[in-house]
Amino acid sequence: MASLASGPVCPLPRGEHDRVQLGHGSGGKMSAQLLREHFLPRFGNAHLDRLGDGAVVPVEGGEIVLSTDTFVVSPLEFPGGNIGHLAVHGTVNDLAMMGATPRYLSAGFVLEEGLPFDVMDRILDAMAAAATAAGVVVVTGDTKVVDRGKADGMFVNTTGVGILHGGFRPGPTGARPGDAVLVSGPLGRHGMAVMAVREGFSFESEILSDTANLAPLVDGLRTRVGAAVHVLRDATRGGLASALNEIAGAGGVGVELDDGVVPVPGPVQAACEMLGLDPLYVANEGVLVAFVEAGAAPRALEVLRGFPEGAGAAVVGRVVAEHEGMVVLRTGLGGTRVVDMLPGDQLPRIC
Amino acid sequence: MKYLTEYRDPALARSLVERILRVATHRWTLMEVCGGQTHTIVKQGIDEVLADAVEMIHGPGCPVCVTPLEQIDRALHLAARPDVIFTSFGDMLRVPGSRCDLFQIKARGGNVRVVYSPLDALELARGNPDKEVVFFAVGFETTAPANAMAVWRAKQEGVSNFSVLVSHVTVPPAMVAILESPDTRVQGFLAAGHVCTVMGWEEYEPLAGRYQVPIVVTGFEPLDILEGIWMAVRQLEEGRHEVENQYVRSVRREGNRPAQELVSRVFQVVDRGWRGIGVIPASGLGLRPELAAFDAERKFALQSIRAEEPAACRAGDVLRGRMKPFECPAFGTECTPAYPLGAPMVSSEGACAAYYNFGRFRRSAAGD
């Protein structure tokens, strides 16, 4: 260990973390570590340990699906949506990924002193409209106000309840060798839309967030593809790469992606090139990943493409029995590379 | 996407690969200087498909990786001061200092901000006159002009709460250090296209002659790199050792004169330490004495902060091409992107991180 002649700046041994860092919220390895070391040891149980987008819990006479999500985004309003859209779509989508039809939501708000009512009302209008469109009812809620500077305008938590349909149970551990890997649309729009506003970038064509209700797509898959759908996951924080790594790890399988078929819109690609970011790790709010039996993949693709949110759906890879827990991309040149989970947030490259 | 997709065409790339494999009579050892090139090579699997014709050694051209530990510790010290807003390019934030990194300082209340340009840092200084705004001016000749511009403007406008912590390095002295090292295996170089966009290639001509190595100024896209390798291999096969320019769409022989003038108005050549390598004479840029007011090292009396590098990290051997990242005993065990021992594991341009992120599968497939 090196010594400092003057004022040690950080009294920690290398690699030790004694407090929360932003990277713990990235959806990458630090997030997983946060859960593993601090949350699961205290709360762990058969439902939670599955680490799905939600939990299937028994109730008298049947089962329901529960899911919760908290929304923090700066700015609150961005091209293509606002935090209100995210708060409804995020939880509705998490329920849908469990195979459930979303029914009820609770909504909790932390409001910052000084938040203009017109901004708040626009967000609430968006939430109400998104809930109506998704067929969910906000049945209970809560508001708290904190001092100016203690919240980024507004934080929102939503918890959702959904109902299951018989045997349709896509789960986080369901991936099997041979499955086709589908995405429902082009990647990276939400993350880059928010970043463009936050950093004051403007690109030739504006990038709009993809925030969307994915429950109709799941409904379509359930009714027309059914049990051949093994895993569903919305590729939110951490992007497609993190979602695939989680699925590969949970299922004990490998995933192979093909370079050149992963759909990335031109403006997103351009923005990522400029900032030195990889679109595979950029957040989406309206893209799902589906692992489907190979034979049913063409049908699943057709189903997804039948919805406006799924018009850009594509088969991007497959599940293999080799390199367990690892996602590998085959380059156009015939080479390969590992698409690992990032430790924390993606860092813009220097040059 | 215009100007990018045409340099990534897989069919053209494969035909270049075949041409290189056909023309190489034996396996040549080339070094790409720049970390951006390393990134493309490993990301696209170029080294893998060319393995029979060339061995690519990844050079010391990642600015994040070669910034000495001492400068990182000084940055951490500054960032922890309550009166300082510390600004940096994003990938410097996870570089480990002796005890922690900038993210940890940030979590403890340090005001650390990622900027995309030193001019954004200057803007922060204008907007926060009650704070000291420090920009971490790292990088090669590529980032020097913009950093020089920020200091120059600060001086002209009298922005006295702005300063820069300088750790600039230059490419040619590092190439000389590699070529003069007795166990060097490098037979040819891909020079860094963006550095040469600023500096031109005149200064490489004496190197090619004196050390009898081909030097090809090369871009960063897959086709650029394959063409650069092709040009270097062709020279080696023909027994030539010249400076050639593959990156013609960006680089001229004389470089960008106004940028060079600005750099020399603000910076002077100094000896500079390189992480893992040590001090290389006349290999860096420091602020000219008349701009000392903008030099964070002097302004905050940081010279007394000294650091020694951890022995387990073999970054120096990796950066000099003596060792492949995965040959390091700490690679992937003690040292990972989540807990990096040395800087090449931190930056996405770093040779170790590039191998860790993109190469693990290949080695597991090869069974080593």
Image (cartoon, rainbow, N blue to C red):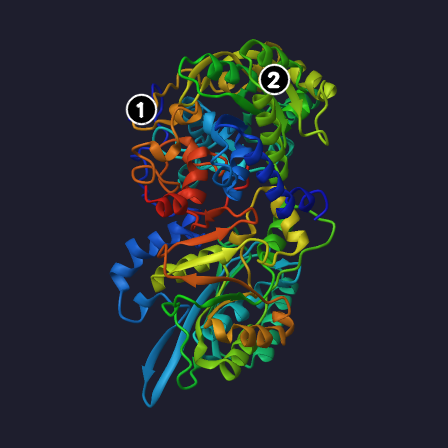
Q: In this view, does A299 lie to the left or right of B68?
A: right
* Residue occupying the point 62% across, 42% down: B15
* Residue occupying the point 48% across, 71% down: A294
Where, quadrant-wise, is the C terminus of chain A in this rendering?
A: top right
Q: In this view, does B39 lie above or below A247?
A: above
Q: In this view of the protein, can residue B77 be seen by the observer?
A: yes
In-front residue for pair A278/B45: B45
* Residue occupying the point 70% across, 23% down: B157
Outermost residue on the bottom side: it is A61
- Name which quarter of the figure residue B101 lies in: top left
Q: What residue type is labelled 2?
A: Arg
Disc marking residue B240: 2
Secondary structure, mark 1, is loop
> Label 2, label 1: how many angstroms apart (C-alpha)?
46 Å
Chain of the residue where label 2 is placed in the rendered structure: B
Same chain, labels 2 and 1? no
Disc marking residue A233: none
Disc marking residue A2: 1
Badge 1 crowding class, 10 Å Cα cut-off, few under 14, some 14 to 19, many 20 or more, is some
**Residue A268: percent from left, percent from top:** 64, 52
**Residue A26: percent from left, percent from top:** 45, 52
Q: Is residue A75 left or right of residue B322?
A: right
**Residue B84: percent from left, percent from top:** 50, 31
Secondary structure, mark 2, is loop
In-front residue for pair B200/A57: B200
